[in-house]
Amino acid sequence: MLKPSDLLKKKNPYQPYILLFSGILFFLPFLGAVHLFDWDEINFAESAREMLISGNYTVVQINYQPFWEKPPLFFWLQVVSMKMWGVSEFAARFPNAIFGIITLLTLYYLGKRLHDARMGMIWALVYFGSFLPHLYFKSGIIDPVFNFFIFLSVVYLYRSASRYPGKSALRHAILAGLFSGLAVLTKGPVGFLLLLLTFLSYWVWSGFRKVSNLKNILAFALTFTLVTTVWFGWETIKNGPWFLVEFIQYQIRLFTTPDAGHKQPFFYHFVVVLLGCFPLSIFALPSFRNEFISERGSFRKWMLCLFWVVMILFSIAETKIVHYSSMAYLPLSYLAARYLYHLISSKNLINSGVSYVVLVIGLLFGLLLTALPLVVLYKDALIPLIKDPFAVGNLSVPVVWTGFESLIGFFFIVSVIVAYIFLRRQRTSTALLLLSYASAFTLLLYLIIVVPKIEAHSQRSAIEFYKTLQNKEVYVRTIGFKSYAQYYYSQIQPGMPQEHLDEQWLLNGPIDRPVYFVSKVHRKKKLEAYPEIKLLKEEGGFAFFKREVPEQP
C-alpha cells in the first residue's frame, strides 16, 4: 500500500508527474467561474483586449490612451491566451495557471539539484499548499510571472557566483541577465533593482569576497540590455522618450508617495506574508536561525538576502498593496522546505511552538472561512448596524446563501487539527501532504461556491450593467470612484476623440452619443445636480444614470 512517506522519498520517479497533475487539477479548472476583479485583474485584461482590438502590440493602453504604469510582456501573454480561448476571464487568468504549473516543477527540479528529490517535492508541495501563493496562480495579476523571472535571475546569479571562476559561471551570468530582463519587461525597473540589491546584500554578507569578473558582468549587462531593448528601445525609437520618461516618473511616484487607499503602516507586509503564506510562513521561522541541512554553495544566504530585500524595500515604499511583497514567497518557501526536510529526514519531533502556531493560525483561517457564509446568510440582522450606504447596497443584492457553504471552512478546520496531530506524532510527511492538499481543495471549493456569491454582492451589479452596453455607440463613465470594469465589460472600441474623455464635457457638453454614468449610491448627488442626467436605477450599492444627446434647436 502506498504511504504518504513514499511520495517524499529521495528517489521516486513519479514525483514530477504528481506535481504536474496537481497543478493541472487545481490551477486550471473554474478560472472563469467569476468575473475579473477591479482594479488589477480588469486593468491588465483590458490592456490585452485593447492590444487585440487595435492591433497595437507595442504601446500599452487603457481606454485606447497610453498607459505607462506597466511594460507589455504580461499583456502579450494574455493576448496569446485570448487568441486561444477568446476574450474571457479564463483567458485572462490562464497564463498564471500555466506559470503555476511551471513554478511547481521548477521548485522540484531546483530542490533536487541542490539536495535531492525529497527536498524538491517538499519545496513544491509547501508552495502549492499555501494560501496566497496558491491563489495568485488562479488570478489575472502580473506578479506570479514577474516573481518567477526574478527568482530565476537570482538562482542563476547564485550559480554564477558559486561557480566562479569556472567556465559555467559565464553561462549562468548570461541566464541571470536574460531572466532579469524578462522581469523588467514584465513589471519595470524593480525587476533589476531587486536582483541588484540581493547581490549587493550577499556580497556584503560574504565579506566582499570576489564572486565574479569583468567578463561575466559584461555578459550579464549585455544580455539584460538586449532583452529589455526588445521593448524599451523599440518604443523609444518609434515614439520618442516621452513614454519611457512617464513610465519612470510613475515608478518613482509610486515608491515615494502613497497611492490613494494604499497607505499602510511599515509592518504591513510582514503581517501579510506571515498570515497570507500559511502554512509555509510558519514552517520557515526556524530556518531564519538555524541552517538545519548542509548544501553545496550558499543558496540559503541568497534566499535570505532576497527575502529581506523584498520585505524592507516594499515596507519603505509609501504605496503598500498586498501583492507587492509576493516576491518574498519563493525564498520563504525554500526556508520552510529546509526545515521540513530536516524533520522528515532526521525523524525529529517538530518544535512545539511551530506546531502550535500552525494549529492556531489554521483554526483562525478555518473559522473565518466558516463564519463568512453565515454572516452573509443572516445579513438582515447585520444591515441596520452598518452606516455605509454602499456596503448596505452590496449586502442587499439578492444572492442565495444556504449555510452549507460553511462546510468548506469546517473541512479545513478538521484537516488542520488532524495535521497537527500528525505533526506531534512525528508523521511530518503525512501532515505536509494533508495540509497542502486540504488547503488546495479548500481554495478550489471556495472559488467555485463562495467567491462568485461574494462577487455578486461586491461588483456584479455594475458589471452586468456594463455588459448591456456592449456594441452600442455610447460613452460610459464612473463618477466618484476609480474603475476599469466599464472599459472591459462594455468592450469599448477605438476611435473615441481625446476631448471626449473630459468629464465636464460628458456631464454638460455637446455630446454626440448617449452617456451612461455609474456612481456609488452615497456619491450620486453630484450627478443629480445635472437636470439632463436621469437616474435609471440603484442596485448593489451603485447608482446608474443616463444622459441623452441634447436635441438640436
Image (cartoon, rainbow, N blue to C red):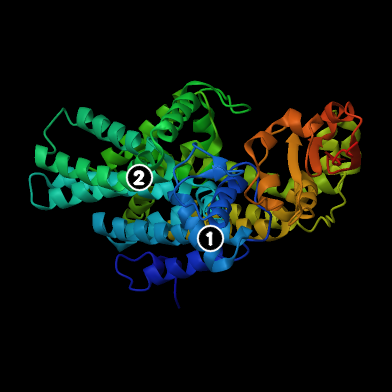
| Mark with earlier residue (1, 2) | 1
Which residue corresponds to the image point at 20% horizontal and 49% vertical from the top-left?
A: 174
In the displayed structure, 288 sits above or below 30; it is above
The residue at which mark 2 appears reads as 234
Mark 1 neighbour density, 10 Å: few (under 14) some (14–19) many (20 or more): many
In the displayed structure image, the side of residue 482 where residue 28 appears, left or right: left
Which quarter shows the C terminus? Answer: top right
Which residue corresponds to the image point at 31% horizontal and 61% vertical from the top-left?
A: 109
Structural distance between the alpha carbons of marks 1 and 2: 28 Å
Q: Nearer the viewer, mark 1 or mark 2?
A: 2
Judge by depth and name the residue closer to the eye, 547 or 6: 547
Q: Position of residue 15 (x, y in %)?
A: 38, 69
Three-letter amino acid code of the residue under disc 2: Trp
Q: Are marks 1 and 2 in contact (CB under 8 Å)?
A: no
Q: Which mark, residue 325?
A: none
Which residue corresponds to the image point at 62% horizontal and 43% vertical from the top-left?
A: 63
Q: Position of residue 107 (x, y in %)?
A: 36, 56
Mark 2 neighbour density, 10 Å: few (under 14) some (14–19) many (20 or more): few
Return the residue found at the far front.
553
The residue at which mark 1 appears reads as 94
Three-letter amino acid code of the residue under disc 1: Phe
Q: Secondary structure at mark 2?
A: helix
In the displayed structure image, the side of residue 284 where residue 292 appears, left or right: left
